[in-house]
Image: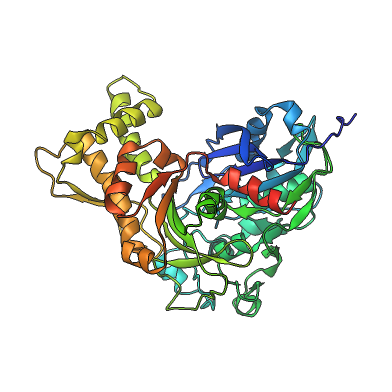
Amino acid sequence: MKPARNVIQNHHLGLDLGTTSVKAVIWDSENQHCECEAVEATGAKVPHKDPLFDEQSVTLILNAVQRCIARLPAVQLRNVESVGVSGQMHGVVFWSSKNGTCCYDQGKYSVVESKVSNLVTWQDGRCTEEFLRTLPVSKSHVGVSSGFGCATIFWLQQNSPQSLSGYDCAGTIQDFLVAVICGLEKPVMTTQNAASWGYFDTASSCWEVDALKDAGFPLLFLPEVEEPRFKAGRLKETWCGVPAGTSVGAAFGDMQCAVHSVLSYSRDRNEKNAVLNFSTSAQLSFVMKPDFKPIVEGNGSQPIQYWPYFGKTYLAVAASLNGGNVLAKWIAMFSEVFKLVGVPVADDTLWQVLTRAAAGDDALNTNSTASPLLFGERHLPASRGSISNLGPDGFSASGVTRALCRGLVSNLLAMMPVKFLRASGVQGILGTGSALIKNQALRDEVGLQFELPFVLRQSGDAAVGAAKAISEHP
């Protein structure tokens, strides 16, 4: 028996499928605030003997999403008007649309693992510079990097063709979720996620089919593409308490949604602000003028790139591969030391202790310099991290933590300098993202280095942005 349907016209469910966790919110669009929220770690990373590979379990991600939604009040879930979904960009998951990708039981879905691949994430490094040089030249202004969906498909086709057999669909993890809950035979993808795969012309909103076809690319894996806020369908079944028939939008990119979640502050004050997001990775971005059209420069691997946003506008983005993931590696090293001596300490505790110490006066005065490029950068894929100018005073846990925070901020500013921000009319910085919210030392470095007014927006994140975006065009 279906639950009673009594829709409150201003309540919307927002979901974000992040790299390490998922989040669900219910957004009140009339009063412009978040009614409730829940976060769940996915623990989805799949171990692999090759350190360049970065894959995640789709089963564990879907289970985390459903646990997350189940933590929201049932009465509010029953009254949701629409569902907006965002998630980690660039990555690719494959599935078969035949004979059931997922099983449905008692309001939830479970993955049929023989029908669904692992998610190859944006952090995957199997597409080396040498391999990328063998691929067809893209006409897009974005370019192609390792971890981009089309590059990954090329690699799999050439190096592991058997891994593609039996599949007839592909998309980002958020595209997969929308296809499952709406019962779509073929996925639909927004321009935001299509651009993140590479070989997508944002001016015409079309894949570069001729170049891909000539190179032998399996075209069946290219989803249909629509503008953001396109209605992908409706819930096929009641899902985690959200009634069947609820409208679902095609999935957004998490970066665009994170920006969208905080820019109402700029509109309210009639200011042009840039958004600084520090989560697993880091991005500094601002909205370009409506008439802006990007041009192709070089191979598309410049530090500032232009990504589709909402309303056929673009974001100017400095997207670093290094953010909270660098600090997480640093924390993991300490965690390993404690385990070796038989005194395990929770990562959350280590994070709190180290970041608190890094915000102190002693750490502030460290002369150590960190270039924290553990994961390289798309415009500098061969770069790696280093710490220099270590002396006896700065050689401490708090001093090196502060140097890492300083280096993360200075790296973004090297990609998008303050001079460029000012010349573009940017008047201030709005900060968001879990790594920034939880780290006083990182926030202090933003204030010291940016030379622009800085405001932390703790309520802003991609899940909220997805709910806001879908509520504006349900």
Q: Residue furthest left?
A: 392
The residue most toward the right is 1
- Quarter of the picture holding the N terminus: top right
What is the x, y in percent for residue 135? Answer: 51, 74
Q: In the figure, 400 relative to 426: above or below?
A: above
What color scheme is it? rainbow
Camera-side residue of 196 and 215: 196
Q: Residue at x 42, y 65 (%)?
A: 425
Q: Residue furthest top?
A: 343
Q: Position of residue 345 (x, y in %)?
A: 35, 23
At x 50%, y 78%, the residue is 295
Q: Is residue 266 left or right of residue 69?
A: left
Depth check, front residue: 240 or 47: 240
Going 31% across and 34% down the picture, which residue do you hit? 355
Q: Is residue 125 visible?
A: no
Name the image quarter holding residue 473: bottom right
Task: Choose top left, top right, bottom left or bottom right for residue 390.
Answer: top left
Residue 372 is left or right of residue 22, and the answer is left
- Can residue 369 be seen here? The reply is yes
Viewer-proximal residue among 400 and 357: 357
Residue 298: where, in percent of width, then height? 42, 78
Q: Is residue 34 above or below residue 292?
A: above
Q: Is residue 344 left or right of residue 3?
A: left
Q: Residue at x 37, y 69 (%)?
A: 423
Query: What is the tally of numbered marks visible in this picture?
Result: 0
Residue 24's place in the image compared with 91, above or below, is: above
Residue 313: image x %, image y %? 58, 67
